[in-house]
Amino acid sequence: MESKNFFDDVYDVVRQIPEGRATSYGSIATFLGTKLTARMVGWAMNACHGMPDVPAHRVVNRDGMLTGKHFFGTPTAMQELLEQEGVKVKNDKIVDFKKVFWNPSDELL
């Protein structure tokens, strides 16, 4: 399937992250075959606010830190969305990130 642009590819992956799970910018970039562009995935996440079908709150940095939290409506909105899905967050970091981690390279074909 050929898509319109890189951001659209990112959004297609993010839409498939199950509720209660999270992934990293780098994992999405690796899945899309562009390992060195995790920062571009971050830019795509920043640009998708206002798109209700893209659960950007499920994308964090490789350590589980809520590095994109400043791009949500309030400083705690990203954490609140994750906690509504059962994901525990402490000090702006997902608790037990390895257990919550969803790897698109393993989950998507």
Image (cartoon, grey):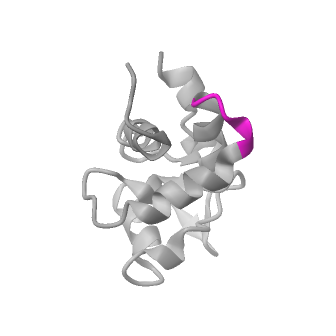
Give the residue at x 48% y 83%: 75
Q: Which of 28 and 65 is in front in this view?
A: 28
Q: Specify whether residue 90 is in view.
A: yes
Q: Which of 57 and 28 is in front in this view?
A: 28
Give the residue at x 60% y 52%: 40
| Magenta highlight range | 32-36
Number of dots carrying numbers: 0
Give the residue at x 41% y 47%: 20
Q: Position of residue 44 (x, y in %)?
A: 49, 55
Residue extending farthest top: 109
Residue extending farthest bottom: 74
Q: In this view, does 21 lie to the left or right of 55?
A: right
In the image, residue 95 above or below residue 30? below
Residue extending farthest front: 4
In the image, residue 32 above or below residue 24? above
In the image, residue 77 above or below residue 29? below
The image quarter containing residue 2 is: top left
Q: Where is residue 33 in the image (x, y as percent from the top left)?
A: 64, 28
Q: In this view, does 34 lie to the left or right of 21?
A: right
Q: Where is residue 65 in the image (x, y as percent from the top left)?
A: 65, 63
Q: Position of residue 92 (x, y in %)?
A: 61, 72
Q: Specify whether residue 86 is in view.
A: no
